Image (tube, helix red, strand yellow):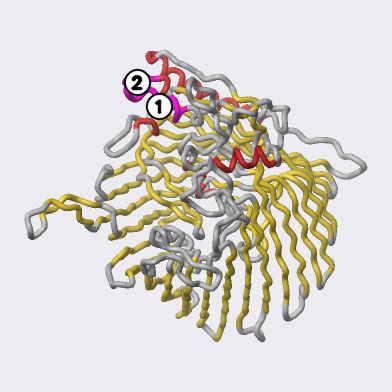
Amino acid sequence: MMRPISVLPSVRIPSKRRGILAAALTLGALTVGAEGVARAFDLPTLGGKPVKVDVTETSIVSQRFREREGEDARNQGYFAWLNRLNLVLNWDRFTVGARIDSALYALRPEDREIAPQDRAITLIDGASRYRNSIYPAKLYASYKSPGLELTAGDSYAQLGRGLVLSLRKVDELGIDTTAFGGKVVLQRDPASFTMLAGFVNPSRVDEPTGRALFLPKPLEGDARQPLFGSDRVVAGQIQLGRGLPVVLSTNVAHFTKCAPFRYDERGNVIADGLDRPFGSCDTRDVSEWLASLPKNLSPTLASPSMLNASQTLEIPSLGGAGSLYIEAAIQRREGESGREAALSGNALYGALTTNKGAITNTLEVKSYRNYYNAAGSINVTKASAFANLSYSAVPTIEPIISDTMFGFFNVCVNGARDRVDARLSPNVLVYGAFGYTVTTSELPGGSCDKLGTSQTAQNTTNYVTDLLTGVEMRFDNNRSFFFANTTVRNDVSAAGEPYYKERAVQYTLTKYISGPYSFEIAGRHRMRYQENENQVEVVDPQGNTVFSERRWVQGENYTALKVAPQWVITHGFEYTTQDGFATFYNNGSIFWRFTMQNNLRLFVGQQRGGLRCVSGICRLFPAFSGARIELTLRF
């Protein structure tokens, strides 16, 4: 675990100067970035070989407006300046890199006038939010030569299709997880060997919420409890058959959870930055730390150790007519008390792609039994923004942005999805997909053992069908295109009662006008129903007032004028009829690429909050209402 170099003191600003501060800091961010371009320089050669320095700086300055209907005042009204400075030095076969992250906040909820009854909860919430900080987010040095790669520091890794290990970056969700330690990759066809060991290192600051994984600020009467543990991973892969008709891989990952700090005899954190800077694996410290984590969420959250292993078989070419991939995995978890049942799981995933003429067919199947993603040790009761931190990710066989797999949908599940793509002409593609899934773990309390046997007295089985149809068309010599698809999803219980239903349409039309000009319109519109969601009071036939679910619609439409390659001017409109949320959201943005490597984006307006997912990894985003400037400089 890498702790911040410093957590800077809070900034308190008189109300009459707040607007001036926001404007000054915004201008300062842009000025510093602009000056950075002028200071670009070339280094002399070393040993007759060039030394290359790449610097990328991303600065995000935002000011949230006041809260709207259904929004929490603690999520709005504040000023934030987040900066990420990437430095990469290349010489010969060596690379050294660092990413320095910093955050500065003002106009925080605790800086404003607070009603006496809200002060305590605001201060507790603010103890781990809006923390001024600067810290080394990523540090690494690597050596690469034919057949050999050595990395010290931070590195990404994925073994197989993610069933065993998946440490990666997902920009759409603000996820950037690496292992800080060592990585070795040896390749000599037809074999390769990968070994990885280190401390799991996620990003410590969540930009959409201002939540930080640093040790919370001390508060009178509130014991300081860490938000993130010291998680370690040792993983390896042996691959045989590279370049041959059949490729076999054996993948193993072992996760261990230790305490991020030592604890004294009273169970209080010893917050000394030099004392166990990478955490403590002493039995008493680990017990104190794991006991502070919630017990009613994923069983892997507070599991002291966990083992994932898999065997894969891949046939890259089926006689030139397709490919085949199969992965079988097992999982073994250590229970927190040592008395838990059903600590073993297994998983089977397969993908078969066939091609014949203009037709491509892709069939995916999954069969998972008590197989969980390896959750990071996050105290999600105080840092829910990081609840999606996971070190493995099972293939979902669903569309990438699917956000309709609720609960632990993929823990106890059997399903298949088939997609057919037909190219009618060089410029026209039509496709359709149908999926059928049976899950016993989507409903609250649903679970199974390693044989797939349900572990609950009530029937928690849900049956899910989804249908996707779409078209892709290109015209104007590939300068214009039209993509569209429709989705129908039905998720029903064993009793035939609807649990979730959706009808949706998605589209993107880009029309070339002339010269550098083009016009684009893109949107997604959904009609949704979910059990226990969007409830309203109604009167039943007996005259009693009860709660009943009702459908709601939500969607967005974005219209843009593009002037290639410099300008994109966009207007966005979003909406929802879900109870408890504002109905309409309007926004506008301007993207300016002032050089081929440097750009600036200004966004003003509102965006709907809600659940967003990428390949089965999801997170809740708060609604945004305000102004945001993002400046990216590369030199």
Does the magenta-highlighted stretch encompass residue 38? no
Q: In which quarter of the image is the C terminus?
A: top right
Residue drawn 60% across the image and 50% down it: 169
Q: Residue 384 carries which label?
A: none
Q: What's under tag 2, amino acid-wise?
A: Ile
Q: Quadrant of residue 185?
A: bottom right
In this picture, is 512 found above or below 398?
above
Image position, residue 55 (x, y; %): 68, 38
Quote the CA–CA distance across marks 1 and 2: 8 Å
Label 2 SS: loop
Image position, residue 151 (x, y; %): 78, 49
Residue drawn 51% across the image and 82% down it: 358
Q: Which mark is residue 122?
A: 1
Q: Looking at the image, which is closer to me, 168 or 537?
A: 537
Does the magenta-highlighted stretch encompass residue 116? yes
Do the residues bearing badges 1 and 2 touch, measured as CB atoms within 8 Å? yes
Residue at numbered disc 2: 114
Image position, residue 259 (x, y; %): 65, 39
Residue drawn 35% across the image and 58% down it: 524
Q: Give the range drawn in magenta.
A: 112-126
Residue drawn 49% across the image and 59% down it: 616
Label 1 SS: helix
Q: In which quarter of the image is the N terminus?
A: top right
Residue farthest toward the front in the current orientation of the protein: 339
In this picture, is 135 found above or below 560?
above
Evaluate whether residue 341 shows in this view: yes
Image position of 36 (left or right of 510): right
Lower position in the chain sequence, tag 1 or tag 2:
2
Image position of 284 (left or right of 555): right
Category of crowding for the residue at label 1, using alpha-carbon neighbours closer than 10 angstroms: few (below 14), some (14–19), many (at least 20): some
